[in-house]
């Protein structure tokens, strides 16, 4: 939150949505800041991750918005950079700026998942690049290299599609694929203006180690495989059918379970290699 309030420009509204956290301390602290740009909203009851994302979308009033994590960091020129990119590509539904990954204490951190993201991310070569259509869908399906909390979204597009609550773990990927299928585009830039915090105990890591993430990814890819086929997108269809990254990630988690002697978990995770 502090990094948002410290942006080089102040023509923004920061909405903090409290999904009925059991500890009221965070809400009390937000209200104590008394910053006119800051608005605190408390849900009437706990909605859960996916439904709360759509609640946040409902609260958007600007033409563009960001939905960042509580402990991620915007560098001071983030807003200025992404809004200039949006001005240069007004039809783009998403703006993906450059991102650094940091750990719990703020040191640069590049685990295997993020090294893979860096390798598969489309090359920009110094100037921003706009991606769309099957190329964008195929690239994201091969490996979701986008950093959801760093994205600047076009509000009307997201309000039209909304987050699919059927996929609470992969709802960002589902939304991006929906946008690509409907003709929307993403601008990708290399200038680093955002720091994404990676925790081993994060939701994505936890759901990977117990296998629920992979189950949901397979369900998602089965759904979009059909939609890609209907669109005539053969290459994207093949990527969704192969889901190579899901297999590789499940294999890595299975090896970790084997090393730790969790043979029941190993068997469950290893099964995703052949599904």
Image: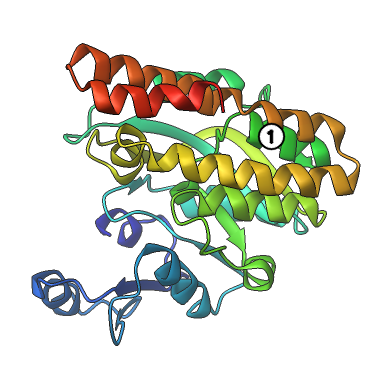
Relative to residue 242, is residue 266 drawn left or right?
left
Residue linked to disc 1: 240
Under circle 1, the secondary element is helix
Q: Residue at x 70, y 55 (%)?
A: 178
Q: Residue at x 51, y 55 (%)?
A: 167
Q: Residues within 10 Å of mark 1 (few under 14, many from 20)?
A: many
Query: Residue 255 location, x and y as percent?
Result: 32, 14
Query: Residue 239 location, x and y as percent?
Result: 71, 29
Q: Residue at x 44, y 50 (%)?
A: 169
Q: Eyeballing the image, is 262 above or below 166?
A: above
Which of 259/117 is in front? 259
The residue sitting at the right extreme is: 232
By what rule are the colours in the image chosen?
rainbow
Which of 101/133 is in front? 133
Q: Eyeballing the image, is 272 above or below 23?
A: above
The quarter of the rendered structure image containing the N terminus is: bottom left
Query: Residue 210 location, x and y as percent?
Result: 31, 37
The quarter of the rendered structure image containing the C terminus is: top right
Q: Eyeballing the image, is 16 above or below 101?
A: below
């Amino acid at each position: 939150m502090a990094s948002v309030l410290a942006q080089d420009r102040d023509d923004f509204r920061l909405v903090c949505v409290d999904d009925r956290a059991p500890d009221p301390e965070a809400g009390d602290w937000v209200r104590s800041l008394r910053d006119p740009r800051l608005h605190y909203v408390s849900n009437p009851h706990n909605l859960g991750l996916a439904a709360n994302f759509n609640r946040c979308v409902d609260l958007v009033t600007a033409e563009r918005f960001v939905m960042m994590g509580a402990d991620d960091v915007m560098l001071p020129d983030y807003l200025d950079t992404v809004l200039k990119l949006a001005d240069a590509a007004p039809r783009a539904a998403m703006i993906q700026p450059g991102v650094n990954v940091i750990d719990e204490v703020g040191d640069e951190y590049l685990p295997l998942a993020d090294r893979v993201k860096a390798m598969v991310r489309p090359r920009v070569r110094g100037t921003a690049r706009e991606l769309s259509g099957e190329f964008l869908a195929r690239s994201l399906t091969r490996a979701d290299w986008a950093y959801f909390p760093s994205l600047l979204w076009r509000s009307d597009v997201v309000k039209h599609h909304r987050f699919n609550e059927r996929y609470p773990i992969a709802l960002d990927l589902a939304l991006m694929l929906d946008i690509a299928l409907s003709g929307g585009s993403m601008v990708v830039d290399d200038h680093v203006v955002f720091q994404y915090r990676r925790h081993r105990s994060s939701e994505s890591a936890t759901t990977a180690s117990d296998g629920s993430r992979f189950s949901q990814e397979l369900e998602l890819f089965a759904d979009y495989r059909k939609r890609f086929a209907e669109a005539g997108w053969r290459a994207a269809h093949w990527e969704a059918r192969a889901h190579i990254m899901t297999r590789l990630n499940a294999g890595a988690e299975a090896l970790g379970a084997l090393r730790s002697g969790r043979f029941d978990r190993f068997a469950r995770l290893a099964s995703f290699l052949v599904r």
